[in-house]
Amino acid sequence: MAKKFPIHPAHPERTCWGCDRYCARDELACGNGSDRTQHPVEIFGEDWMEWGLPPEPAADKAPGLDSAAR
């Protein structure tokens, strides 16, 4: 089971976020590369959870499904 992903970690720069191990930045145990993977808050800022696409409409209310079923 995957660990819970922290939304706003206290010091994201101290951890590699590339896998579920969350290794220290100088102990990359997974071999995910030579550089640590940044947390989204480091890349996109404090409001990173608000970024993204708008939610899609529900499948039963999507346009064009009534005509396709007939």
Image (tube, rainbow, N blue to C red):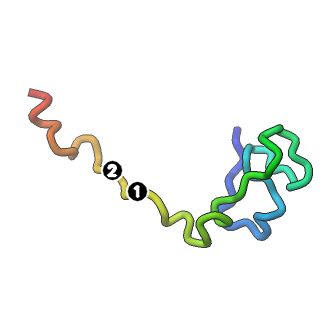
- Which residue is drawn at the image coordinates 79% and 52% (left, top)? 36
In this rendered view, identify the residue nearer to me: 67 or 15.
15
Mark 1 touching mark 2, by CB under 8 A? yes
| Nearest-to-viewer mark from 1 and 2 | 1
Q: Position of residue 67 (x, y in %)?
A: 9, 34
Q: Is residue 70 above or below residue 60?
A: above
- Label 2: how many Cα within 10 Å (few below 14, some 14–19, many 20+): few
In the current view of this chain or complex, which residue is farthest to the right? 27
Q: Position of residue 39 (x, y in %)?
A: 69, 59
Residue 53's label in the rendered image is 1
In the current view of this chain or complex, which residue is farthest to the front? 34
Question: Three-letter amino acid code at disc 1?
Answer: Leu
Q: Is residue 59 above or below residue 41?
A: above
Question: Three-letter amino acid code at disc 2?
Answer: Glu
Q: Helix, strand or loop at disc 2?
A: loop
Reading the image, the residue beneath label 2 is 56
- Which residue is drawn at the image coordinates 80% and 45% (left, top)? 21
Q: Position of residue 27 (x, y in %)?
A: 91, 49
